[in-house]
């Protein structure tokens, strides 16, 4: 599968501009890590793009991403990508047994939090987001309530990097594509 084919799937099933931007944000972080780890950039890109493609039609667990995985299989998506997508939702019970699966889990919640932090900055831009501001907002449980802080901490540990380094990596990755992300 190519990135273009993944985009076709994303745009077919995801109509919300904010959810598409979230997919692009996660993709940005995934690409950063693929390059850092010497992994297949296109696989990581596709995984980031498609991880929530089914969320609008199946917003409740466990339908998302279980039913979405069936759609992806019918479209010929590689099983390695599907397993990583299934693993990003801890309730599926699918282990994150590949570096790509661990990376997706690590990037999903954090990309959402970084986006939320950017939107409360004076100019609503990622250029104003610093690691310390993300860490501060992580402590504020009322801020971006839907973001699972425990998953962010656990996922950095699974990747074997410090939380601070992980946040910086994702800020840097998203900054490179800030126009696409609306940040």
Image (cartoon, grey):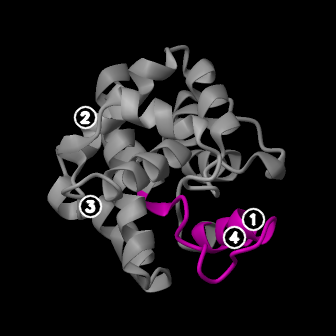
Residue picked out by circle 2: 172
Work out whether 24 lies above or below 20: above
Decide: few, some or many residues near mark 2? Use Cα within 10 Å; few <14, some 14-19, many ≥20. some
- Disc number for residue 70: 4
Element at badge 3? helix
What residue sits 76% from the left and 45% below the top?
A: 90
Name which residue lies at 40% across and 46% down. Answer: 114
Q: Which label lies toward us, 4 or 3?
A: 3
Q: What x and y, as percent, mark residue 151? A: 66, 37
The image quarter containing residue 127 is top left
Look at the image and say whether residue 70 sits in the magenta stretch. yes
Q: Secondary structure at mark 1?
A: helix
Q: Label 4, label 3: how many angstroms apart (C-alpha)?
A: 28 Å
- Mark 1 touches mark 4? (CB < 8 Å): yes
Secondary structure under the numbered disc 2 in the rendered image: helix
Asked if disc 4 and disc 3 are in contact, CB closer than 8 Å, the reply is no
The reply to whether callout 3 and callout 1 are in contact (CB within 8 Å) is no
| Dot in front, 3 or 1 | 3
**Mark 1 surroundings: few (<14), some (14-19) or many (≥20) residues within 10 A:** some
- Indicate which disc residue 181 carries: 3
State the CA–CA distance, disc 2 to disc 1. 31 Å
The image position of residue 89, as x and y in percent, is 71, 51
- Residue 175, position as x, y percentages in the image: 21, 44
Instruction: State which tag comes first along the sequence, 2 or 1.
Output: 1
Magenta residues (range) = 49-72
Identify which residue is drawn at 42% across, 61% down: 22
Image quarter of the C terminus: bottom left
Q: Quadrant of the N terminus?
A: bottom left
Q: For residue 102, which quarter of the picture?
A: top right
Q: Nearer the viewer, residue 139 or 87?
A: 139
Circle on res. 66: 1
Going from N to C along the chain, the mark reached first, 4 or 3, is 4
């Amino acid at each position: 599968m190519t990135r273009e084919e993944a985009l076709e799937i994303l745009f077919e099933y995801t109509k919300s501009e904010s959810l598409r931007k979230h997919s692009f944000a996660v993709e940005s972080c995934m690409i950063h890590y693929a390059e850092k780890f010497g992994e297949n950039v296109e696989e990581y890109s596709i995984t980031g793009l498609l991880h929530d493609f089914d969320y609008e039609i199946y917003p409740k667990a466990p339908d998302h991403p279980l039913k979405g995985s069936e759609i992806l299989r019918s479209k010929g998506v590689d099983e390695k990508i599907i397993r990583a997508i299934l693993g990003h939702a801890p309730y599926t019970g699918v282990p994150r047994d590949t570096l790509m699966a661990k990376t997706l889990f690590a990037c999903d919640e954090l990309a959402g939090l970084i986006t939320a932090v950017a939107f409360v900055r004076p100019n609503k831009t990622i250029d104003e987001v610093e690691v310390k501001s993300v860490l501060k907002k992580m402590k504020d449980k009322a801020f971006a309530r839907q973001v699972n802080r425990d998953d962010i901490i656990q996922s950095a540990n699974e990747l074997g990097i410090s939380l601070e380094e992980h946040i910086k990596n994702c800020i840097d990755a998203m900054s490179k594509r800030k126009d696409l992300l609306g940040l």
